[in-house]
Image: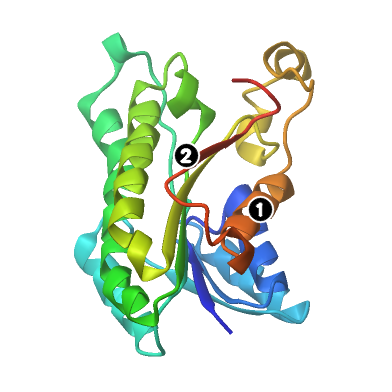
């Protein structure tokens, strides 16, 4: 049984990914920071459904705390599947954006990617098999009004993922980035009306978290062993 870590696993997309990976037979660590109780509940749901999961809580922006938590997980062996899904919004147009809005969003998505991924690499390399999937956004591909911080943070994952894919290609480890569009979740319900979605999305609907999870699970499988360094959009033909 391979072991997987999903950061930001307490959110709608992260939870769907965790459930899909568990259904594929992996032991899944559902990560959270502020949403610790929800992560624990998701792990319990997975276990009740016959899967294998635990919750883990730490702040991905805290390098020391991240390393300490990951070292504890590594005591049982390498984590061979990593989904870097943690991210936050703090939207404002650039002329009115506060420095802390910029820094915090960059810190979670981009510095969090480093703080979580780097400690897991050498153990993963030793197994000669691994899957790293970074969750980006359509905002990083096409831009979005009021989200220069979020777009910058997620776009940074594109370059980092591509470079890391080159570094790990000979070690049996793939690195890919998935960029969802408008996905139905509590976070998007108050942002996009039905009319707005029909205007923005050629398919005239929001995506489902499970659809993103299906793609991530495929990229984390043996079947996707020759796919690496790619940015794959899932957005109903938005871009």
Could you say which quadrant of the image residue 53 lies in?
bottom right
- Which residue is found at the position 30% from the left and 30% from the top? 101
Looking at the rendered structure, the number of numbered marks drawn on it comes to: 2
Q: Along the line of sight, which residue is nearer the eye, 147 or 201?
A: 201
201 displayed left or right of 216: right
In the image, residue 1 above or below residue 232: below
The answer to whether residue 205 is above or below residue 227 is above
Write the residue at 28% across / 9% down. 95
On the rendered structure, is 187 left or right of 125? right
Examine the image and state in which quarter residue 157 appears.
top left
Give x and y (percent) for residue 109: 36, 44
Which of the 4 image quadrants contains residue 28?
Answer: bottom right
Residue located farthest toward the bottom when viewing the structure as drawn:
76
Cα distance in 3D space between marks 2 and 1:
13 Å
Mark 2: give few (<14), some (14-19) or many (20+) Cα within 10 Å: many
> Which structural element holds mark 2?
loop
For residue 177, side relative to residue 199 (left or right)? left
Q: Position of residue 40 (x, y in %)?
A: 58, 71
State the quadrant of the N terminus. bottom right
- Would you place residue 97 above or below residue 100 in this image? above
Q: Earlier in the sequence, mark 2 or mark 1?
A: 2
| Residue 193 visible in the current orientation | yes
- In the picture shown, does residue 34 fall above or below 109? below
Residue receiving disc 2: 136
Say which residue label 1 marks: 213
Element marked by disc 1: helix
- Estimate the x, y position of residue 222 in percent, counting from the top left: 60, 68
Q: Which label was assigned to residue 72?
A: none
Quarter containing the C terminus: top right
């Amino acid at each position: 049984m391979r072991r997987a870590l999903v950061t930001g696993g307490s959110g709608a997309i992260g939870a769907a990914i965790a459930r899909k990976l568990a259904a594929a037979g992996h032991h899944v660590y559902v990560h959270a920071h502020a949403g610790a109780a929800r992560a624990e509940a998701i792990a319990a749901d997975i276990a009740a459904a016959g899967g294998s999961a635990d919750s883990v809580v730490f702040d991905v922006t805290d390098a020391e705390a991240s390393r300490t938590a990951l070292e504890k997980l590594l005591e049982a062996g390498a984590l061979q599947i990593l989904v870097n899904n943690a991210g936050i919004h703090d939207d404002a147009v650039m002329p009115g954006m506060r420095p802390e809005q910029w820094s915090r969003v960059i810190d979670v998505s981009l510095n969090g990617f480093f703080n979580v991924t780097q400690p897991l690499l050498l153990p993963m390399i030793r197994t000669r098999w691994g899957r790293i999937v970074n969750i980006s956004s359509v905002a990083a591909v096409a831009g979005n009004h009021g989200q220069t911080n979020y777009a910058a943070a997620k776009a940074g994952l594109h370059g980092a993922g591509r470079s890391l894919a080159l570094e790990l290609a000979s070690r049996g480890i793939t690195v890919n980035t998935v960029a969802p569009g408008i996905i139905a979740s509590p976070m998007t319900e108050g942002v996009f009306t039905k009319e707005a979605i029909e205007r923005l999305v050629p398919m005239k609907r929001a995506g489902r978290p499970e659809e993103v999870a299906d793609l991530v699970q495929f990229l984390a499988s043996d079947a996707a062993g020759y796919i690496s360094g790619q940015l794959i959009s899932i957005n109903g033909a938005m871009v």
